[in-house]
Amino acid sequence: MTTAEDLFIIALALGPPDRPVGQGDLSLALAGAELIDLAAAGALTVDGDRVVPGPQPALDDRLLGEASSALARQEPYERVEDWLWRRGRDLSAAYRSALEEDGRLTRSSRSRSPFGADRVEPADTPSRRRALNRWEDDEPVLSGLAEAVGVPGRRTESVPDPEDDVAATVLAAVNDAVMELEAVRQRRSIESAAFANVWRGP
């Protein structure tokens, strides 16, 4: 299990039913979770706001391995924010597909889903229990990523280790990217409303 998988499970299991976690928000946070896990595996470091690749370690997780292979390996290297947008494109759908293939998702009875009419929820598996245990333990990185995408009920006082520059930088970038995405949504909503008013006339 990876932080990204744990985050996906938490978002499905604990996301607010009246306002499900958006796929775009979740995709950005999943890309951030991958960076944090890759740093823990020794595959990268963060220098300022740049993702500096290291050796490519053998990774058991397929999606994390894909993330490692996708790192930009030419200077000046990629900014963390740029990675989130590039790697994050449709990433929540990729994690959904992987978890479904492994039998870790099941059909959901919830009225709404961030994935449309085809509703899913975490199956009762060791993966789900592990993710929920990390959540209950108030694990700072998972809590911070989940909060960034709107999962309620975990107003944590804990923060990543001050010496963990990667986690701190990535969490800040995820929050900024999610806010930027929300600003884009609001702008498009206003533009759509204005366009509709033009067609309706005075």
Image: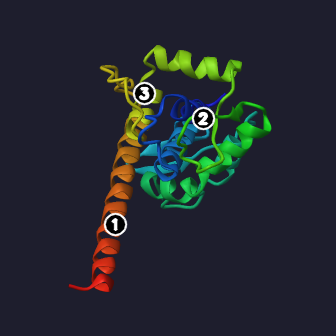
Mark 2 crowdedness (10 Å alpha carbons): few <14, some 14-19, many ≥20: few
In 3D space, how far apart are the residues under numbered discs 3 and 2 (Cα atoms)?
Answer: 22 Å
Between circles 3 and 2, the one closer to the viewer is 3
Mark 3 touching mark 1, by CB under 8 A? no
Report the residue marked by disc 2: 42
Q: Which residue is depicted at the point 67% across and 43% down?
A: 96
Residue 84 point in image, percent of width and height:
49, 52
Residue that badge 3 annotates: 143
User: CB under 8 Å between callouts 3 and 2?
Assistant: no
Q: What percent of the width, then of the height, locates residue 81?
A: 43, 54
| Residue 198 at least partly seen | yes
Position in image of residue 155 (x %, y %): 32, 24
Circle count = 3
Q: Which residue is mark 1?
A: 189
Which of discs 1 and 2 lies nearer the camera? The answer is 1
Amino acid under disc 3: Ser
Inter-mark Cα distance, 3 to 1? 30 Å
Residue found 44% across the figure and 35% down from its top: 145
- Looking at this view, is 39 or 21 the one in front? 21
- N-term-proximal mark, 1 vs 2: 2
- Cα distance in 3D space between marks 1 and 2: 42 Å
Relative to 22, 182 lies left or right: left
Q: Earlier in the sequence, mark 3 or mark 1?
A: 3
* Type of amino acid under label 1: Ser
